[in-house]
Image (spheres, rainbow, N blue to C red):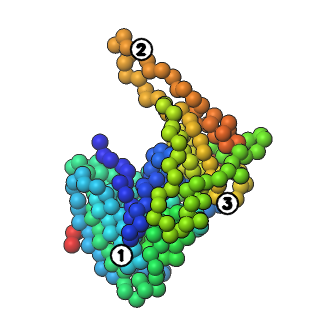
């Protein structure tokens, strides 16, 4: 089975846990992040305007199961053992401004050959080492660190466009965006109002009072058996796309709530489908707590409303394996 997660993402010396990215699959470790409708996807300049590009880049196939790495520095992009589909998810994700950056979800990418997903010859990851021009790196200035994914970063847009340029040049990638009206859930405020506007967030508060501290944030209390527990600090747009990765349809934010909030939620771990039919083995016990939709309403004062809405996709029209150098 192909591993579709990141071990660690780094920006200079600052390690960013993989749950800053869309792809992470827990709501605690595990609700993947995505943007909401007024937030728009990263847009490239007009076709007549060339994309900014790296000064030089090396691309090599890496067919191994070694750990993945991702270093984003003001003067360099270093990738180790990354699936190309995951790079596309990064390059065409959503800039959330002060809330950071979100990858596209896997199910938002349509088309392309199986090798971009690591489905040929075991695992087709790529190593990329791309250098930024020295004069541009000086303009970029200080490394953004974790803020590249979780806050504002002055060189984020340029780096994203340079990665788009690299994919177009070395992989001959051609993409287009499509929007379809599909069944979705609208994330709305439940009757009685939200339950999290005045909560405190130890991770955020400790960082604010001691931004240069090397001490780790306080650990949350242990999670009850059979439950998934999360303490989240995010916008409602991020929450909506987080939920999209855990439910049977996309979620769009219609709460009308602005800003970033600290939220705590506990819900029953989803039960896997039983394969014991005809084996005289009793089925596993049912969930011991509320489902995710129930927990949203009971613990956060948020509700999922079935409706129809616009869902954006990135369509791959063309891509080729690169020549290595």
Distance, label 2 to label 1, CA atoms, is 55 Å
Name the N-terminal-most of marks 2 and 3.
Answer: 3
Looking at the image, tell me whether mark 3 or mark 1 is earlier in sequence order: 1
Q: Residue at x 29, y 72 (%)?
A: 129
Q: CA distance from mark 3 to mark 1?
A: 32 Å
Which residue lies under the disc numbered 1?
Answer: 76
Image coords of residue 277 (percent x, y): 38, 16
| Callout 1 secondary element | strand
Relative to 275, does residue 75 appear above or below in the rendering? below
Residue positioned 44% across, 21% down in the render = 284
What residue is shown at x 21% (from left), y 69% (from top)?
324
- Quadrant of the frame with the N terminus: top left
Q: Position of residue 225 (x, y in %)?
A: 48, 31
- Is residue 145 visible in the rendered image? The answer is yes
Above or below, comparing residue 200 to residue 91 in the picture: above
> In which quarter of the view is residue 291 placed?
top right
Residue at 63% x, 34% y: name it. 294
The quadrant in which the C terminus is found is bottom left
Q: Determine which quarter of the picture holds residue 133.
A: bottom left
Pointer 3 residue: 259
Crowd around label 1: few <14 · some 14–19 · many ≥20 (10 Å):
many
Return the residue at label 2: 282
**Can residue 315 be seen in this snapshot?**
no
**Comes first in the chain, label 2 or label 1:** 1
Q: Nearer the viewer, residue 276 or 317?
A: 276
Q: Residue 95: x, y in percent?
A: 54, 66
- Residues at circles 2 and 3 in contact by the CB criterion of under 8 Å: no
**Helix, strand or loop status at disc 3:** loop
Tag 2 secondary structure: loop
Identify the residue at the far bottom of this view: 135
């Amino acid at each position: 089975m192909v591993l579709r997660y990141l071990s660690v993402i780094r920006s200079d010396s600052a390690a960013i846990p993989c749950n800053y990215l869309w792809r992470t699959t827990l709501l605690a470790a595990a609700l993947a992040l995505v943007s909401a409708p007024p937030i728009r996807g990263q847009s490239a300049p007009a076709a007549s305007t060339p994309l900014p590009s790296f000064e030089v880049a090396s691309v090599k196939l890496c067919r191994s199961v070694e750990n993945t790495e991702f270093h984003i520095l003001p003067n360099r992009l270093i990738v180790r053992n990354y699936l190309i589909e995951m790079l596309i998810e990064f390059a065409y994700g959503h800039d959330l401004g002060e809330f950071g950056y979100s990858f596209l979800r896997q199910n938002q990418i349509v088309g392309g050959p199986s090798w971009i997903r690591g489905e040929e010859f075991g695992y087709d990851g790529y190593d990329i080492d791309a250098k930024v021009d020295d004069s541009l790196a000086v303009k970029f200035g200080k490394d953004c660190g974790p803020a590249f994914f979780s806050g504002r970063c002055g060189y984020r847009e340029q780096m994203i466009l340079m990665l788009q340029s690299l994919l177009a040049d070395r992989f001959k990638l051609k993409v287009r965006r499509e929007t379809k009206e599909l069944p979705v859930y609208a994330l709305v405020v439940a009757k009685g109002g939200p339950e999290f506007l005045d909560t405190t967030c130890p991770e955020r508060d400790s960082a604010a009072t001691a931004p240069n501290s090397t001490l780790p944030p306080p650990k949350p209390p242990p999670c009850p058996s059979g439950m998934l527990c999360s303490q989240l600090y995010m916008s409602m747009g991020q929450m909506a796309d987080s939920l999209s990765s855990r439910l049977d349809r996309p979620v769009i934010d219609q709460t009308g709530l602005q800003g970033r909030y600290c939220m705590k939620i506990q819900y029953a771990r989803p039960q896997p489908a039983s394969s014991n039919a005809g084996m005289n083995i009793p089925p596993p016990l049912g969930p011991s707590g509320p489902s995710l939709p129930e927990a949203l309403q009971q613990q956060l004062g948020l509700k999922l409303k079935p409706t129809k809405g616009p869902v954006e996709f990135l369509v791959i029209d063309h891509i080729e394996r690169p020549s290595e150098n």
